[in-house]
Amino acid sequence: MTKQNLKIYFLVSMMVFCAIVLRVLAKYDIWIVPGGIARSLIYIALYIGWGISVRNRIIQTQVRRYLISIAGLMASWFVIRSTKYYFTADITIERQLWYWYYLPMLFIPLFSVFVAISLGKSVNSKLPELTLLLYIPTVLCLLLVLTNDFHQLVFSFPKGKVWTDDHPGYEAGYYLVIGWEIICAFAAFIIMLIKCRLVQRKKYLPVLLLICSVGYALIYAGGAEWMRLVGGDVTAVQCLMYTGILESCIQCGLIQTNSGYRALFEAGSIGAQIADTDGHIRYASSNAPKLTEEMIRLAEKGAVMPDRRTLIRSSRIDGGYVLWQEDISDITALLEKLEENRKTISESNEVEQENYKTKVKINAVREKNRLYDRLQAQTAHQTDLLDQLLSQYEAESAPEIRHRLLAKAAVIGAYIKRRGNLMFIGERDDVTDTAELSACLDESLANLELMGVECAIDIPGQNSIHIQDAIRVYDFFEAVTEAAIDDIRFIWLKARSLEDAVIFYLQAECETELTALSGLADTCVHEEGVWRFSMCIGKAGEQA
């Protein structure tokens, strides 16, 4: 939790505390009218502030629109309530304002259902047309309440007495309206839980607040005096509870937000920094070097070497520059070694010996070139894809899309690097350990998490397998990742060791059709949006 969040929570708590104090004072006939107006203004400010916060945090258009509408309905509820109690003396008007309470009471749960249905959809998606039919019973319930004076099917009033909300009778229509509100509220929360079943972070918070809301209603209905003194304002308490439930859904991940990019960038291992046009660093990854303002200015014009092992490059972006580091220690070490050899040759005059050393180096370079050419041939598709992503990144202006393109590039780059490692190991030996394969998959999954993908892996080590089998498993994982990279939400890998074989399981949750990859695995099952693959490979020296 950040300091900014703590400040906000403290401010909200103090505002609610002040509102409770004003209510208690009013119970003792102290500042009844001014205190009541002040308390209403506090709650109105809270819900307006929450609506502004939602607008800034929620990226999905439909979810943001309905959450802002809920905040507006809560604020309007307090406006209607304050008008009824403090700004009118006409009994008929007061009764009509009381009926209008049911506008927010009915539409807040309905909009919560729309929020739940909209979760997990694209940014600009719209609700299915059949969903909008839910407006019909909600509007009918509202009209039933607003026209109560003509039929008294919701509230009934004793004969010969003034019609007010002090001691009304509750008819069948009242329970119909309340039942529809409860159905919508519980349906919204259940849909959220079903849609976000993979989110584990503090999912208990909405449940606790929902239990508190129900518990409050039961205690209040039971006539507890202390509850009527402190929390007797049903409007205030239920609005707070409902706002708390929705906010906790946001905090625990049931409702996704577009916040946390600073932490995501800092957690990256790309050695990059983002500076504004004045040369001030705004964002930096965890392994990025500290750069002076002068060095940043020089990097804007061309590559800069802060030391013999690092090269700093930059590229122009909207509002500033992105700077990244390249490790040139191998090149520097090679140049230094060549210089040392030149001096040795000139000083010792051992021409034949130096010629031999030179031939060894040439052969080493040739061997490296052979290996690099082989790697390039085997990863040509990924190299082209990486160039395409970087070109799209340079041409793209939207920050969200640029961030996602960088994350995709990181996934492809991790595969190219680790695929080369496996190939180099295969040059020395045809056997490796499952721990090496696990390390390759760990790095790829770490970069997938930058895209918000839920990842899990469980591959035990100390199992010897052929290097070609390890490459086969890793290539299959990359094929699944690349095929579903635009909509993959969850990927899980597990290995189970048998007596003479190792079985690898891969599960991926996505909308992409992966049937074409079934031929690369031993088994393929698709169920409820989840693809399940398995591959059986023999241990080194064994046959599966």
Image: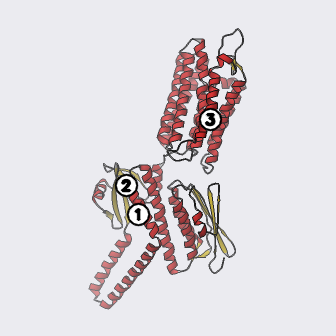
Q: Residue at x 34, y 60 (%)?
A: 313
Q: Residue at x 66, y 13 (%)?
A: 163
Mark 2 highlights which residue?
395
Residue situated in front as seen by the camera: 12 or 113: 113
Q: Is residue 282 left or right of residue 161?
A: left
Q: Is residue 486 above or below residue 84?
A: below
Judged from the image, the secondary structure of the residue bearing numbered disc 1 is helix
Q: Residue at x 38, y 64 (%)?
A: 326
Asked if the residues shown at circle 1 and circle 2 are in contact, with their CB atoms under 8 angstroms apart, the answer is no
Mark 3 highlights which residue?
134
Q: Amino acid at mark 2?
A: Ala
Q: Amino acid at mark 1?
A: Asp
Mark 1 highlights which residue?
387
Q: Please identify the quarter of the rendering in which residue 272 is found.
A: bottom left
Q: Residue at x 72, y 22 (%)?
A: 171
Q: How is the image coloured?
A: secondary structure
Whichever of callouts 1 and 3 sits on the residue coming sooner in the sequence is 3
Camera-side mark, 3 or 2: 3
